[in-house]
Image (spheres, helix red, strand yellow):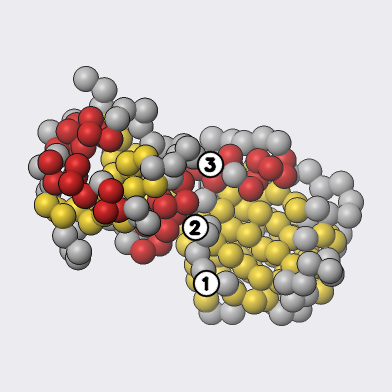
């Protein structure tokens, strides 16, 4: 099996990966070893989309990491004792640009001194009044234990979560079906759109609309089977 190791401390794990019977390569891998935590997984998926990920823990925060020692994870996978878990992703599109997120999509006021005004429609049905606040977070089940949870004090296991960030009026969070389509129109901005922890950002001007929905792409994680 050919693997590419991804992570800021990847040199620490290379010898162990090779000992596990894997060939370490720099391109065209069968799998990507994500060595770190949740943030590393997000970056690895962005850098190598669609390639199954092997999660090795180098962080206290790694929700999808196995509790097994790293060497046992590698052994199980090298022996084909694993299952493949697919994670839903979100797609955010605006102004001809599209970003994908495994964790969450954040729409935030560009200038923290000024709130952003926006409207929300779900499946082409307007929610109602203009909302004033710092923006919104749309999360996958995987991402619901992150920024979304810090706002709502909750998480979910199925669907798409919509949380209103610091709005001036009470706006309860919403959990939508996976096939829900959310549109955010900026009435007063500008605002910025982020996907996961990617460096790229998209600025949204007043009058522009952002569409968020389930992506046709999925992230895949190899989970070792416990013998």
Taking the spot 57% from the left edge, 72% from the top edge, the residue there is 201
Task: Give coordinates of residue 141: x percent, y percent.
Answer: 53, 41
Which marked residue is nearer to the observer: mark 1 or mark 2? Answer: 1
Specify the quadrant of the image occupied by residue 184: bottom right
Callout 3: helix, strand or loop?
Answer: loop
Distance between mark 3 and mark 2 Cα atoms: 12 Å
**Among the two numbered marks 1 and 2 on one chain, the one whose residue lies closer to the N terminus:** 2
**Among the two numbered marks 3 and 2 on one chain, the one whose residue lies closer to the N terminus:** 2
| In this view, 150 is above or below 44 | above
Q: Is residue 119 visible?
A: yes
For the residues bearing labels 3 and 2, Cβ distance under 8 angstroms? no
Task: Give coordinates of residue 108: x percent, y percent.
Answer: 70, 64
Q: Which label belongs to residue 101? A: 2
Residue highlighted by disc 1? 200
Q: Residue furthest top?
A: 227
Count neighbours of disc 2 (C-alpha within 10 A) and say few if under 14, some if 14 to 19, many if 20 or more: many
Q: Residue furthest front?
A: 12
Callout 2: helix, strand or loop?
Answer: strand
Distance between mark 3 and mark 1 Cα atoms: 23 Å
Taking the spot 62% from the left edge, 68% from the top edge, the residue there is 193
Task: Give coordinates of residue 118: x percent, y percent.
Answer: 78, 66
Task: Give coordinates of residue 82: x percent, y percent.
Answer: 23, 33
Residue highlighted by disc 3? 141
Count neighbours of disc 3 (C-alpha within 10 A) and say few if under 14, some if 14 to 19, many if 20 or more: many
């Amino acid at each position: 099996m050919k693997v590419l190791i991804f992570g800021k401390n990847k040199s620490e794990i290379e010898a162990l990966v090779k000992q596990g019977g894997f060939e370490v390569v720099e391109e065209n891998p069968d799998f990507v070893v994500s060595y770190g935590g949740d943030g590393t997984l997000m970056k690895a998926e962005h850098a190598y989309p669609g390639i199954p990920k092997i999660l090795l823990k180098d962080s206290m925060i790694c929700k999808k990491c196995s509790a097994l020692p790293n060497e046992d994870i590698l052994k199980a996978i090298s022996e084909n004792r694993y299952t493949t878990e697919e994670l839903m992703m979100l797609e955010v599109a605006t102004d001809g640009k599209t970003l994908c997120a495994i964790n969450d999509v954040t729409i935030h006021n560009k200038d923290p001194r000024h709130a952003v005004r926006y409207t929300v429609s779900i499946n082409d049905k307007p929610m109602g009044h203009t909302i004033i606040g710092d923006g919104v977070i749309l999360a996958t089940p995987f991402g619901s234990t992150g920024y979304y949870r810090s706002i709502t004090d909750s998480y979910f296991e199925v669907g798409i979560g919509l949380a209103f960030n610091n709005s001036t009026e009470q706006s309860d969070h919403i959990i939508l079906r996976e096939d829900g389509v959310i549109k955010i129109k900026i009435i007063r901005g500008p605002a910025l759109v982020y996907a996961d922890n990617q460096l790229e950002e998209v600025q949204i001007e007043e009058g522009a609309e952002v569409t968020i929905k389930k992506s046709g792409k999925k992230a895949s994680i190899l989970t070792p089977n416990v013998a």
